Each structure stands twice: as structure tokens, then as C-alpha cells.
Amino acid sequence: MTLSAKDTEKDKGEKHLILYADDDIDDLELVCEAFEQYSDNVEIRTFRDGGQILSYIEQMGDRNPKPCLIILDINMPVINGKDVLKKLRTIKRFDEVPAVLFTTSSMPVDKEFAEKHKAGFITKPLNAKQMERISDQFIEHCTDEIRKNLKKNI
């Protein structure tokens, strides 16, 4: 599933790339909908498990733009989000890419794990109204430059 929209003039028409892995199709759709306000500047690529997102990342060449954000559910089949995050932090090109664990967990141990691996931690909202604000929370984990670029164009 990919969120598509018109290209912008930024970076030769390239959009900021967000990678999102979650095995729950409803959550995938909700996050894509939450980012619709940024659709002129953002492309979201979604994956149904940790193995798929890792394969995609490992196949990205140096000429491909790095994602501006990686969102990971903790509980996924094949490879869970924590293991994906640990692997990401061992790949030189992705060791500093902003990442967020997006999960139903509110366990302090999961939040501590995220902090230890230089990632944000956001608990999944309980209803659609809360979901409307979630894209802004994700954007806050991007670099200052990307945040400014995204917010000036909405």
C-alpha cells in the first residue's frame, strides 16, 4: 500500500519517504489516512511484517533516498519490530534514521527499549479521533529540516 499524490518541487520532485511495518491492515490504513494532509510531500510505503521491511531496506541502494522516518509495530510475524529496530541500528546508512515503535503496548520496558535504540515510542490510539493527531506526533520524530519542510507545505 502506498500513499500517492502530486510531486513537489523539493529535491527534484522527490517526496520524503516513510516506511511503516504493521501486520494489522486497519492500522496501516489509519496511519496512511493520518498522513493524507502531507501527501504532497510524503510517500508512505507499507509492509505487513518485519521481514518485508528489512528486505526492502537491505535492497535500497546508496543512490536511493533514505527514509525520513521508519514506523514499526512491535508485535509482527516473521520478525518483530524490536528485532527490526536492532538490525536497523547495525546498518551504517540507517543507524541514525529516525524510527518510532508504534504499538498497543504501554509497558515501560518497551519504552526503555525504544530509547536505548534511539527510537520514539507512541502508543496506538484507541479511536479515530485520537488517530487524527497521530501524524503530527510521528513528524515530531523527523529531523528539524524535514519537519519544517513538511509543515510549511500543508
Image (spheres, helix red, strand yellow):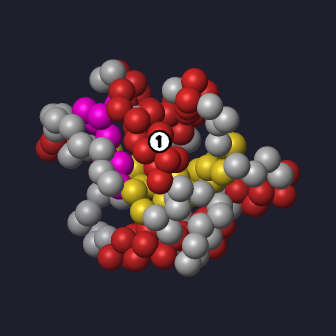
Q: Residue at x 39, y 57 (%)?
A: 46
Q: Is residue 78 left or right of residue 117?
A: left
Q: Amino acid at mark 1?
A: Val
- Tell me if residue 43 is in the magenta stretch: yes
Q: Which residue is mark 1?
A: 31
Residue 62: quarter of image = bottom left
> Residue at 63% across / 53% down in the picture?
101
2 left or right of 48 in image: left
Left or right of 70, for residue 57:
left
10 vs 95: above or below:
above
Q: Position of residue 16 (x, y in %)?
A: 32, 45
Residue 22 versus residue 140: which sits nearer the camera? Answer: 22
- Quarter of the rendering containing residue 66: bottom left
Q: Is residue 12 above or below residue 8?
A: below
Q: Estimate the x, y position of residue 91 in percent, counting from the top left.
A: 50, 74
From where the camera sits, is residue 145 visible?
Answer: no
Label 1: how many Cα within 10 Å (few below 14, some 14–19, many 20+): some
Whether the magenta-drawn stretch holds residue 39 is answered as yes
Q: Which residues are magenta?
A: 38-45
Above or below, 67 relative to 47 = above
